[in-house]
Structure formats: C-alpha cells, structure tokens
Image: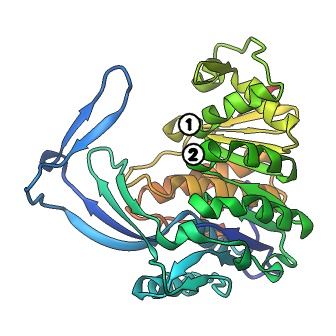
Amino acid sequence: MSQSLPDPASPSLRATVIGSAMIDIIAVIAPENIERITTQNAGASFLLLEQGRKIPAQGIETHIGGGGCNVAVSLARRGWDTRLLCKTGDDLNAGAVLEHLRRNGVDEAAVQRNADLATGVAVMIAAHDRNAAIFVHRGANEHLAYGDIKDAVFEGVDLVYIAPLSSASADCFSVLVEQGRWAGAMVAANPGIRQLTSRTDAFFSSMSNLDLLSVNAVEAAALVPGLIARGARLSGAGLPAEAPQLLRRGLSFGGHDLGLMDFFAGCHAQGLTWVLLTDGAHGAYLSGQNQVWYCPTAPAVVAGTAGAGDAFCSTLVSGLASGQSPEDALQHASHNAASVVEQINTTDGLLDASALAQAVEAKPLAVQRFSR
C-alpha cells in the first residue's frame, strides 16, 4: 500500500501558501451550441461566440478558485495546517472567498483586503472537451506589495508554496522565496508564463533559494533561452524507444532547443533540488539530482480541466515534504488531479488523505524511472 499523507487526527505539518483568490463563474455549453475551430499546423483550438446571440448554457455556476485558494484547500483537505496570503477587495466577493477558506479549514488571517480594489473574477466557457476558455479580471491579485508580507506568516512552517503571481505581485517573488528560506521551510514555486517571460532575470536570481520548481511544458520551454545563456547545452543523449514523447522530443523556444534531460540538468545547476514538469494529459516528470521519474495520468471522465495543475503540484510537493518517495508522491498527485477534473470547479474533487490513499491502492500507476 502506498504511503499516505499526514493523518488529519495527528499533529499537522504547517504550510504557508501565497497566490491568487478568484471568483470563478463557469458556463457549461453543449458542443452543438458553440462552434470550435482547430488549426492543423499550430494545433490550437478556438471557440466562436456569435455576436448578438444569446447562447443557451447547460448550467452556469459560481465557485471560488485561484491558484492560491486551490492549493491552500488542497493541503488543508489532506491534513496540513494551512494559511493563505493573498489580496482581495473589500467587497461581497471577498466575503465569499473568506467563507470558502473557513469552510475548508484554511487560516484566512493573512488575507489582505483593500477597499480600493476589486476581488479577482474569472469567467470560464467549458465546451467540447471541457478545456475551458477563460476571461479573467485579476483585480486585487495584481497588487500584493512588500508591506503585505509579514514575518509571522512564515514562522514555524514546514512548506512555503508560491503559486502564480500576477503583474506587480510578481515583484514580491524574491522576497517571498527569501522569507521561506529564512524560515527553514521547503520552498516550492509554480510561476506562471507571464512571470517567467516578463521577469526572467529576477526569477533566475531566486532559483538557488528554491527547493522545487513546478512548470508545465509551455512554461518549461520559455525557460530554455535563459538556461542556455547560463550554460545549459543540448547533449543529444540517447533515450530508450519506450521513453515518453516529451522526453524524446525535448523543448524548443525562439529557435533555442534543449533535450528534456538537458533542461533538468540546467535547472539543477541553478541550485534546484527538484523539478516538476507537467504535460497535461500526457503525464508528468519529476527530476531529482540523478534520476527522472515519469508518471502517466490517472483515468478520469473530464468535466473541467481548471485546477488540475494546482491539485497535482500541491499534492506532489506536500508528499515530498512529508517524506513520500518520488514514486508515491507522483501517484498521489496524479490521482488527485484526476479527481479534480471530474468536477466542473477547482476544489470539489480534491481528496482527503484517506480517500487519496485508497485511490492509489485501487488503481496503481506505472511510474518509469530514467537515469540522468
């Protein structure tokens, strides 16, 4: 039986999560009521909304989301003593966020409210394969400031998890990483693509203070030029034919190429202990100093893909922080993400420690390991 995460009845590990809080308005549209176009060369898909037409929806629901909220609830549901540092307005939506956190056992004392700003709102259009198109107004999430970061938020914590930060909030990244390091916690970050491309040098300067970096395939590719500028090289090392596709294909960005093993080596050279790369339905990779583990996705009937990455990353990171092996942590992460995508919103599918252990035991996944 796979190792379980901390039992909620036992003394909890403690985490501070920094990230966004959003109101998610989710419209589910039947495929016959909205046109989709997929390009042959770019591989992109587009939903077409007819101007002036009212489009019937199968349902329109309102939920609480945002990377910070999703991760905090994920940790709390599996027994972690969790607090969230985020910024909201001082409006009805902020009240809904705080109620959501309280209901899910997350300490909301560090939430910063500002009457001059609006709480973030996202409108999601879920149709066809349920990979939602999202209209987003980030609102207060873009305005976390140095003065909002209090030392007490980091005292006595075992894990500091920095979810994607928006606009000016991303300027606080280095301070947040340093605070986590000063507290003696495991420090993990899941930066968004805008943060990586607009603040590349600042991000690289903080990498040596991170224990774990989590990126998806698009975000990983965006780091390739910076890693090459810092000494990473395309080695051309061979891989077995049964290796997963991305591991064989590697990453490309702006005319720069790196094999996936070379990408991981470049990240570790910057001081990282762990690198997690998620590749959507194609599985995920975890790199340690000398090994790379690949885990396929757990089976799921997809209702919505929003929140899957937050579920995967938070479960993987907390598993490693609580002493799980890489194989066990990956399997727990994959099953928790699969449970999330079976719900239309980002948190209803999050499993507690017992349910997650049962899911892993019932449907174990074949984790592959490669030497690097």
Colour convention of the picture: rainbow
Position of the C terminus, as image quadrant, is top right
253 in relation to 339, above or below: above
Image coords of residue 49 (percent x, y)? 17, 49
- Residue type highlighted by circle 1: Val
SS class, disc 2: helix
Identify which amino acid the numbered label 2 is placed on: Ile
Is any part of residue 48 visible from this angle? yes
Determine the CA span between mark 2 and mark 1: 8 Å
- The picture quadrant where one finds residue 217 is top right
Q: How dense is the environment of label 2, judged by Cα within 10 Å: few (below 14), some, or many (20 and up)?
A: many
Q: Which of marks 2 and 1 is nearer the N terminus?
A: 2
Residue at 75% x, 49% y: name it.
202
Read off the residue under disc 1. 218
> Label 1 near label 2: C-beta < 8 Å?
yes
From the image, state whether disc 2 or disc 1 is nearer to you: 2
Left or right of 86 on screen, residue 132: left
The x and y percentages for residue 114 are: 54, 84
Front-most of 52 and 328?
52
User: Can you tell which quarter of the image residue 258 is in?
Assistant: top right
Residue drawn at (35%, 51%), measured in percent from left and top? Answer: 132
Name the residue carrying label 2. Answer: 193
Q: Which residue lies furthest to the left in this view?
A: 53
Q: Is mark 1 on a helix, strand or loop?
A: helix
Q: Position of residue 38 (x, y in %)?
A: 28, 30
